[in-house]
Image (cartoon, rainbow, N blue to C red):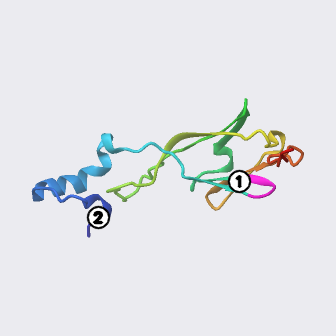
């Protein structure tokens, strides 16, 4: 049985041989290897911002989170461990390697109270807002 990704056949190869080369060589073609860059969702509430990173298969100790000069950096590494068994990988779409994501922090974030939680493959970084700093002011014209 052969598994084929649907999205890779946007344009049909000219020959059957080219089609076979594409199917069997895709996973080992170094020019097509993607860099590991976790997907991010950013959520805002009245009291905080939340950054959600999709990083399944990692452990809490695999992350480094730093705040420096108004920048929040989240980095880590996800290693590919190939088990020695009778399994033979034909394609690997899961992303592996090291990554760094950096975000500019708004002035009203309390960097000393930032917290992180990792559960079910999602790293959630909570950035509480400083309620004392006014973000919006209405100025009355005289």
Read off the residue under disc 2.
Answer: 4
Which residue is outermost to the bottom? 1
- Which residues make up the magenta segment? 45-49
The one of 61 and 112 positioned closer to us in this rendering: 112
**Where, by quadrant of the figure, is residue 20 drawn?**
bottom left
Dot 1 or dot 2: first in sequence order is 2
Q: Is residue 138 above or below residue 122?
A: above
The one of 102 and 122 positioned closer to us in this rendering: 102
Whole-percent x, y for residue 134 in the image:
85, 45
Q: Secondary structure at mark 1?
A: strand
Which residue is outermost to the front? 142
The one of 29 and 105 positioned closer to us in this rendering: 105
Q: Is residue 35 above or below residue 56?
A: above
Q: CA distance from mark 1 to mark 2?
A: 37 Å
Is residue 21 located in the magenta-colored stretch of the structure? no
**Where, by quadrant of the figure, is residue 103 drawn?**
top right
Read off the residue under disc 1.
Answer: 50
Whole-percent x, y for residue 97 in the image:
49, 42
Which residue is at a point 79% across and 45% down the rendered structure image? 114
């Amino acid at each position: 049985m052969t598994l084929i990704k649907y999205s890779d056949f946007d344009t049909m190869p000219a020959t059957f041989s080219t089609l076979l080369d594409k199917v069997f060589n895709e996973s080992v073609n170094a020019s097509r290897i993607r860099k590991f860059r976790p997907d991010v969702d950013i959520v805002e509430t009245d009291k905080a911002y939340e950054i959600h990173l999709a990083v399944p298969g990692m452990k809490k100790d695999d992350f480094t989170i730093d705040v420096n000069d108004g920048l929040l950096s989240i980095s880590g590494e996800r290693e590919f461990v190939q088990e020695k068994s009778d399994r033979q990988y034909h394609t690997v779409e899961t992303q592996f390697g090291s990554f760094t994501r950096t975000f500019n922090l708004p002035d009203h974030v309390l960097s000393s109270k930032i917290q992180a939680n990792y559960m079910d493959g999602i790293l959630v970084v909570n950035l509480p807002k400083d309620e004392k700093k006014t973000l919006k002011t209405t100025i009355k014209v005289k």
